[in-house]
């Protein structure tokens, strides 16, 4: 059974409701991919006020409260979108496909940065992927 996804506090200029919709859809489609993320917090820095996703019995998406996060995914929204829409192989963008290479280039040149546990960051990106 899929965990419940709730929307937490949001302020002016927040993109948390948009991230909430993405997370909710991903969790409904692939609830098994939330395994191993319980107790993890992720901060998304996308060029707007940061968004926090906290994984537990329930998953909460809301504006970031400034507390330390286990993983920070930072980059411009179009660059993150390229990563989320790239075809995957073994949970990573497929380097044999042009879109996969473009997504990997964004990681390599720093347009998208993962800070913290790479394993957890990879799990989160795989969960949020729209091609999985």
Image (tube, rainbow, N blue to C red):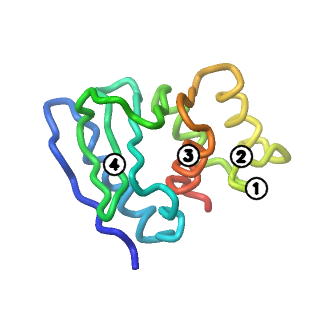
Badge 1 vs badge 2, beta-carbon distance below 8 Å:
yes
Q: Which of the marked residues, 1 or 4, is nearer the chain's N terminus?
A: 4
Residue at image point 65% right, 48% down: 86
x and y, in percent, of residue 66 in the image: 27, 26
The disc at residue 93 is: 2
x and y, in percent, of residue 125 in the image: 55, 47
The residue that disc 4 covers is 54
Badge 1 vs badge 4, beta-carbon distance below 8 Å:
no
Q: Residues within 10 Å of mark 4 (few under 14, many from 20)?
A: many
Q: Residues within 10 Å of mark 1 (few under 14, many from 20)?
A: few
Give the Cα separation between the discs numbered 2 and 3: 16 Å
Q: Which of the marked residues, 4 or 3, is nearer the chain's N terminus?
A: 4
x and y, in percent, of residue 20 in the image: 31, 52
The residue that disc 1 covers is 89
Residue at image point 31% right, 47% down: 18
Question: Element at badge 1?
Answer: strand
Residue at image point 40% right, 28% down: 45
């Amino acid at each position: 059974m899929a965990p419940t996804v709730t929307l937490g506090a949001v302020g002016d200029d927040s993109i948390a409701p948009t991230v909430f919709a993405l997370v909710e859809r991903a969790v409904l489609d692939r609830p098994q991919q939330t395994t191993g993320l319980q107790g993890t917090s992720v901060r998304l820095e996308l060029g707007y006020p940061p968004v926090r996703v906290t994984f537990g019995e329930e998953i909460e998406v809301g504006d970031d409260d400034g507390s330390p996060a286990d993983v920070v995914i930072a980059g411009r929204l179009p660059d993150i979108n390229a990563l989320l829409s790239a075809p995957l192989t073994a949970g990573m963008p497929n380097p044999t496909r042009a879109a996969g290479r473009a997504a990997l280039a964004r990681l390599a040149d720093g347009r998208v940065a993962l800070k913290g546990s790479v394993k957890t960051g990879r799990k989160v990106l795989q969960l949020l992927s729209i091609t999985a």
